[in-house]
Image: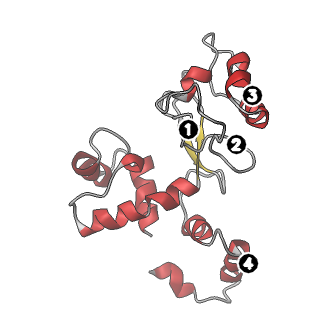
Amino acid sequence: MLAKQVWRLLTNHTSLFYQVFSAKYFPNGSVLDAKPSSGSYSWKSIVKTIPLIKSGMLWRVGDGKQIKIFGERWLSGEEPAKVISPSNSISADWTVSRLLDLSGAGWNDQLVDAMFLPFEAQRIEEKIALPLSVEVLEMLAAKRATIFTNELGFKNVCFEGDAEGVVRSIRRKTAPMLLWGI
């Protein structure tokens, strides 16, 4: 349920919840960049769920100015969603915007081919960049949804096990449904 609160902080910037927490705990960034601080027990609990959200998140590229080339999940398709190519000539601060063609026609294919391993370059070039006027969107890779549900969080928690079997069993009500009432 706490992961759901992180999702609310990501998607509902007009809520009082967002305004209070952003002013106090992440005034110059996103909740995803927030660090545990000497805040309330609620905040410390929320921060502990950020890795869960990050594990199910995938960036959609708009202008690419907010997405770091390395360390962010932005490659669509199969895992890994993060770039694994060596970063020899690339600064850790570079954003995906440096890979886009300045004319707005998509990717700078020559630069992408030169900087990344062949299979990653192919994945990048196949990824559709949204028009530059569109803001960068965040999506959950698991469902391509904009709403975080308990089911998605549970699937991510069970990622190493048989998550599909667990979720199917819960849907059939063979597992205690009180789990979702917590």
> Is 25 located above or below residue 84 in the figure?
below
- In the displayed orientation, state which residue is furthest to the top: 103
Q: Quadrant of the N terminus?
A: bottom left
Tell me the mark number nearer the camera, choosing from 3 and 4: 3
Tell me the mark number nearer the camera, choosing from 1 and 4: 1
Question: Horizontally, is 120 left or right of 178 in the view?
Answer: right
**Residue 29, numbered label:** none
Mark pair 3, 4: CA separation: 35 Å
Mark pair 2, 4: CA separation: 25 Å
The answer to the question of whether label 3 and label 4 lie on touching residues, with beta carbons closer than 8 A, is no
Residue 71 in picture, x, y percent from top left: 54, 43
Residue 117 in picture, x, y percent from top left: 74, 33
* Tag 3 residue: 125
* Tag 2 residue: 76
Query: What type is the residue that disc 4 sits on?
Result: Gly
Front residue of this view, candidates 158 and 93: 93
Q: Secondary structure at mark 1?
A: loop
Which color scheme does this rendered protein use?
secondary structure
Mark pair 3, 1: CA separation: 16 Å
Q: Secondary structure at mark 4?
A: helix
**Mark toward the start of the polypeptide (3 vs 1):** 1
Residue 54 seen in the current view: yes
* Tag 4 residue: 165
Tell me the mark number nearer the camera, choosing from 2 and 1: 1
**Mark toward the start of the polypeptide (2 vs 1):** 1
The answer to the question of whether label 1 and label 4 lie on touching residues, with beta carbons closer than 8 A, is no
Query: What type is the residue that disc 1 sits on?
Result: Phe
Q: Secondary structure at mark 3?
A: helix
Front residue of this view, candidates 153 and 44: 44
The answer to the question of whether label 2 and label 3 lie on touching residues, with beta carbons closer than 8 A, is no
Front residue of this view, candidates 32 and 23: 32
